[in-house]
Amino acid sequence: MPLSASELHRRGVEAANARRFAAARRALDDAAARTDDADLRARIDGTRAYVQAQTGHPSEAEQLCREALDRAGLSDATVALLSGQLGTLLMHGGTLAEAEVMLSRAIDALGATGDESTELANCLMNRSMVRMQRHELAASTDDLHRAVAVYEANGDEEPLAEARHNLGYAALLGGDLVTALSLMTASRPVFAATSDLATAISDLDRAEVLRDAGLTTEAETLLARVAGQFGAQRMPQARGEAEFHLSRSLMRHDPVAAERMARTAARRFAALGSAGWAARADAVRLESRLRTRPSGRSARIDDDIERTASALAHGGFRTEATALRLDARRDGSGRMPRVDASAPTPLRLRAHEVRAARAAAGGRHTAALRAATEGLDLLTSWQQSFGALDLQASVAMHGTDLMFAGLRAAARTRDPAVLFEWAERARHLSHQVAPVRPPVDDAQASDLAELRMLRADLAGADWTTDARVRVLRDRVRERQWAATGAGETRGRLDLPGARAHLDPGTALLAYLYTGDELLCVATTASGASVVDLSWPRLRAAMDGLRADLDVAALTRGGPLSALIERSLAVRLQTLDDELLTPVRAAVNPADAQRIVITLPGVLAGVPWAMLPGMHGVPFTVATSASRWAEVRTRRATGRRPERIGFATGPRVPRAAEEVQRARAAWATTDAATPTLLGGEATVSAVTELAGASDLLHIAAHGRHSADNPLFSGFELADGTLFGYDVDLIPTAPETVILSACELGRSAVRWGEEALGMTRVWLHAGTRCVIAAPVTVPDDVACELLATVHGHLADGMDPAPALAVAAQETGHRAPFQCHGAGF
């Protein structure tokens, strides 16, 4: 018996929802041929329109839907469903105003029946997306909560997951990144169980969260992957949307690639007849062009900008229209569009950027400083909602242009107080909110344990490409974001306040990088001065520095050793000449017997302890002068630790000897020295030891993870102890010595931010970390650090202990103190 038209239509709907579009077309064609019922034929055409839109023919889909709606004799229910279908098509095409009208008509009609149907919930969810794009977040959230209630009542699990995912997207637009990622992550298993394509659709939104959180490398990798999936499925609209978001991410750090990608997306949307989306992509193209060729403006470009902004505003994308018009006014021309306090935070930050740029272009440096200050204060208020270190550092992306605008304007003043203030702003950005430590989380510990096993199993391969590794890494990070609360905002010292913390004989060197030049504010208890440095010569000396240091460490005693050492010595002398010699000329030597250094990210790889002028000089590399002073005020220096823990990792030839010699230094004291060797040094045992120690010394191989520094760590008996493991330690040690290669390195974030394993310990509450940014020979580490322990046992602070040990052993190793070394 042949199937009825209704049954065929039902099968067509099921096939379309499962994205089996060829099967859907066949069933719908057969259904249309077997009925003369006006309502059923109209509903069949509504489903056909959906298939047309999904397979790259949105204009034909819209026309088909409008023709169905124009037919006479349709029931109110059918008109409501078709209105909802047309509204959805218009939404995807970027015609937001009419989309909201049609969806509201459908919602009112379906709601009037009193039947809380799935169709009603679908229309509510689509209208919520229209309202999101128009940044009407309260109304959007109301629609989503109503849709969630209907889906829950009807037992519709897949659309329920989608609605909750969309609540996460609304949170993203409102600036609540933690809630956004939490909701999206909770919904993702439902999508994964449905299909790879459903997962890709959810990942498209999830990539936006990662991008706004500043994790652009991950976001862009994810966007490129989902764009390929949409292309393989012949879904040009979705592919264009992924390309659009990829171009938005690229714009901040690679505007040339962003312009190219945006042009591709705009052409794709134009071919589909998606005028709203084409305008959005054109806006990114034009903004990228303004960044790459700010002086190449022409009347034609200005016309393109105004035409695109008008198209965005007409389509309901008012926020993006304002952003484009703002960027067009960076050069000081024309009047800035008005941005009020109700605008999204990124748009308000951009308005401050443009004000600062316009002021700088006009030579009004005080006004530029004021605009940059107001923008960064706004960013700070946003950061106060985050506690996790990586998230605080990452969202600093949104303040990059403001920070450099402020630094450049401060540099023009040559005023030590102004420059010091901006040095502290730059250093303070990623740790100005004191964290509240997350509660003990067994699930987090379990995921980290599995990651350790996978890292061991994938030794020698790029473990970050493994699918299971990606899932676990995402889950660890996202759980950390959700679990870590934010505490109070930390204070920031001004120049007089900093000088008040400097003892006679202590100098504070605050280096600043403006993007164009390098300066140093040299401060002592008696005064402060600004020193100009040569950034081009420094950059040339630093090119290849890390490779030279690694080669020198690995070829000690070999036939090329003398040649390599001479080459390295020349390079280190050049760094000394450029970084320290001009500063020495500005500071009385008696005022610089001890040195506190604060750095921009571009100088994070300098091995300060190996510079000739620093030999024998106690120094500490502080995250900021404010943080250094805070720690010194809170904790007394010169206090001998009473509990010293030691642990060794595998494959470090002299680790046992290093620990034995270091322990011997404490033999005449009352200090306890528990030690974990070989197989005893598991991750759980070492983290327990850390929580019970005043000083923790770990001799193990370390590895720095540039793509996610909190997955840096050192190798123990059962795998890697990651940066994330440190947050599971209830009380961090006062001092940590990492006798491990690379763990003193930091990954530069957004020009001024640096984040690495040393920062993780300092963020957790450790006062000082001794670590090296590059490879250190095992014999050097063994002899130098054992001598350091001798002086620590005598009550010396870490920085002077390290300086004296270097003189006594003759080893000029790259070990340095981070934090408050004295």
Image (cartoon, rainbow, N blue to C red):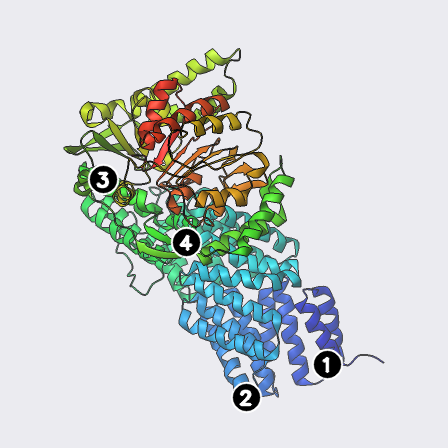
What amino acid is at disc 3? Phe
Labelled pair 4, 2 in contact (Cβ < 8 Å): no
Q: Name the residue carrying label 2.
A: 114
Q: Which comes sooner in the sequence, label 2 or label 3? A: 2
Quarter where residue 319 is shown? bottom left
Q: Name the residue carrying label 1.
A: 6
Q: Which comes sooner in the sequence, label 4 or label 2? A: 2
Quadrant where the N terminus lies?
Answer: bottom right
Q: Secondary structure at mark 4?
A: loop
Q: Which comes sooner in the sequence, label 4 or label 1? A: 1
Where residue 397 appears, x then y in whole percent?
Answer: 39, 48
User: Mark 3 or mark 4: which is in front?
Assistant: 4
Q: Which mark is residue 420?
A: 3
Q: Nearer the viewer, residue 115 or 184?
A: 184
User: Mark 3 or mark 1: which is in front?
Assistant: 3
Q: CA distance from mark 2 to mark 3?
A: 66 Å
Q: Name the residue carrying label 4.
A: 437
Q: CA distance from mark 1 to mark 2?
A: 24 Å
Instruction: Locate residue 433 relative to residue 100 in the image: left or right.
Output: left
What amino acid is at disc 1? Ser
Where residue 792 appears, x then y in whole percent?
Answer: 35, 31
Question: Can you say whether 49 is above or below 682 in the image?
Answer: below
Q: CA distance from mark 3 to mark 1?
A: 75 Å
Q: CA distance from mark 3 to mark 4?
A: 30 Å
Q: Nearer the viewer, residue 250 or 610?
A: 610
Instruction: Locate residue 270 relative to residue 591 in the image: left or right.
Output: right
Labelled pair 1, 2 in contact (Cβ < 8 Å): no
User: Mark 4 or mark 1: which is in front?
Assistant: 4
